[in-house]
Image (cartoon, rainbow, N blue to C red):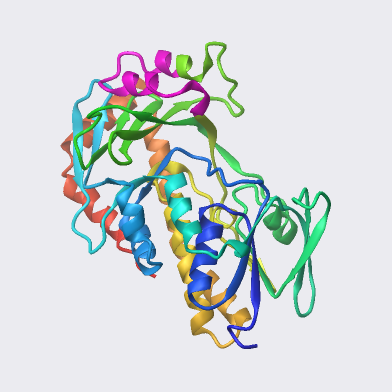
């Protein structure tokens, strides 16, 4: 099969799915994204774009656009709830910057690189039928008002941690709850943190992160140990968070107070154990559908961007599309497994609640040379496709 004479259907219009379509489009391969929402409303306040992700954006020709609406990320501060800096981690010198951006700005940039006809909104994936020469994909709730189907030579499932494509392809894999809830918000606040510095503050069973996403816009995240299915307090999310983080260093309470109550997002911290395989035949998984991880390294979206570029390059390097899918999976499995495991460990350490254990963590963190962490981070963020 001529590598440029086949078409790919991508299920899921998040960052991973759209990035894959962009990378394939740039490689001359036709790809169509199917998204169940009737308009793009990227969920999530903000995200880190480490050098491993900004390298991808540079190759896609989008780095300058994304950087223009993002904040710099040159130092990462680990702090105590009283504000003491336990560690100042320099992110080192890379040929591309580390950034903090709003997810909606990144998605807009990716969409700008695709022809409009390559996006199909209002298509809610129901099932697929894998045949000898193609895949028939069935949708419900489409903008046409009824069920529709489409035929593609190959299909990529990029439909998130609760992927329906994965469930039909590999069986049901229930996400694993890791014991804490994550809240996210976006606020405008003058000088919340020094320019170029972002931070995470550790308390007992709680954390609070502050990211400069450009100008006076700051995205923040808060974590707390809770039961699965945590129910909002009668005082509302903002009120509950103000109570939970009362007395923490500036500007934690001011950031929470400056955030619109209705815009505060809340999700449990979930991931999956590494899957034994990601695909079969003409169908392959990508992003959180294949390797969801807890948010502790800020690498979820970055890994999806890596997937997208590796997938496109695999199609360009292999003699057949089937071989390209196998190559992509083999190149990505070890990398993503490592990130999943490291992220899980960092979350477990960050959520320690015992007073003695948390106090020991604070003392050890303040004594360790930051160069140790800088070296380990460089190993993670130096990855290039």
Q: Residue at x 59, y 81 (%)?
A: 323
Toward which corner of the image does residue 86 lie, by quadrant?
top left
Toward which corner of the image does residue 126 lie, by quadrant?
bottom right
Q: Is residue 333 visible?
A: no
Would residue 151 appear left or right of 354 to someone viewing this image? right
Q: Residue at x 50, y 30 (%)?
A: 180
- Magenta stretch, residue numbers: 241-264
Q: Is residue 77 magenta?
A: no
Q: Residue at x 58, y 84 (%)?
A: 3
Q: Residue at x 39, y 29 (%)?
A: 352
Vertical comparison of 194 with 100: above or below: above
**Quick one: quadrant of the N terminus?**
bottom right
**Quick one: quadrant of the C terminus?**
bottom left
Vertical comparison of 309 with 104: above or below: below
Outermost right residue: 146
Vertical comparison of 222 with 298: above or below: above
Residue 341 location (% of width, % of height): 45, 51
Residue 116 location (% of width, % of height): 58, 61
Toward which corner of the image does residue 365 lie, by quadrant?
top left
Would residue 191 appear left or right of 124 to someone viewing this image? left
Residue 240 location (% of width, % of height): 47, 16
Residue 266 location (% of width, % of height): 53, 30
Vertical comparison of 37 with 194: above or below: below
**Total residue callouts:** 0
Q: Is residue 362 visible?
A: yes
Q: Is residue 258 magenta?
A: yes
């Amino acid at each position: 099969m001529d590598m440029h004479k086949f078409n790919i259907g991508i299920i899921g219009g998040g960052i991973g799915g759209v990035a894959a379509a962009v990378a394939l489009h740039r490689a001359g391969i036709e790809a169509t994204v199917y998204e169940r929402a009737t308009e793009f409303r990227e969920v999530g306040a903000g995200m880190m774009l480490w050098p491993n992700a900004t390298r991808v954006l540079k190759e896609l020709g989008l780095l300058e656009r994304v950087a223009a609406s993002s904040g710099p990320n040159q130092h990462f501060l680990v702090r105590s709830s009283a504000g003491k800096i336990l560690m100042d981690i320099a992110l080192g010198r890379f040929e591309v910057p580390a950034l903090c951006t709003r997810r909606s700005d990144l998605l807009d940039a990716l969409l700008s690189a695709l022809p409009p006809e390559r996006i199909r909104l209002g298509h809610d994936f129901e099932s697929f039928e894998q045949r000898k020469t193609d895949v028939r994909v069935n949708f419900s709730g489409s903008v046409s008002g009824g069920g529709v189907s489409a035929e593609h030579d190959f299909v990529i499932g990029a439909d998130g941690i609760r992927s329906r494509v994965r469930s039909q392809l590999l069986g049901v894999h229930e996400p694993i709850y890791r014991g804490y809830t994550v809240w996210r918000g976006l606020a405008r606040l003058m000088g919340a943190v020094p320019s170029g510095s972002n931070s995470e503050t550790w308390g007992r069973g709680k954390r609070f992160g502050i990211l400069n996403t450009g100008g006076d816009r700051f995205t923040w995240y808060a974590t707390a140990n809770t039961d699965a299915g945590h129910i909002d307090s009668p005082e509302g999310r903002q009120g509950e968070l103000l109570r939970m983080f009362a007395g923490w260093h500036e500007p934690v309470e001011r950031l929470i107070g400056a955030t619109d109550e209705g815009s505060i997002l809340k999700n449990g911290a979930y991931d999956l154990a590494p899957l034994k395989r990601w695909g079969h035949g003409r169908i392959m998984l990508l992003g959180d559908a294949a390797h969801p991880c807890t948010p502790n390294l800020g690498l979820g979206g970055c890994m999806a961007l890596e997937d997208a570029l590796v997938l496109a390059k695999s199609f360009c390097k292999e003699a057949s599309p089937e071989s390209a899918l196998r190559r992509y999976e083999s190149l990505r499995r070890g990398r993503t497994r490592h990130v999943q495991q490291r992220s899980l460990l960092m979350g477990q350490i960050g959520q320690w609640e015992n007073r003695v254990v948390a106090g020991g963590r604070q003392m050890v963190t303040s004594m360790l040379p930051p160069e140790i962490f800088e070296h380990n981070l460089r190993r993670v963020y130096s990855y290039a496709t």
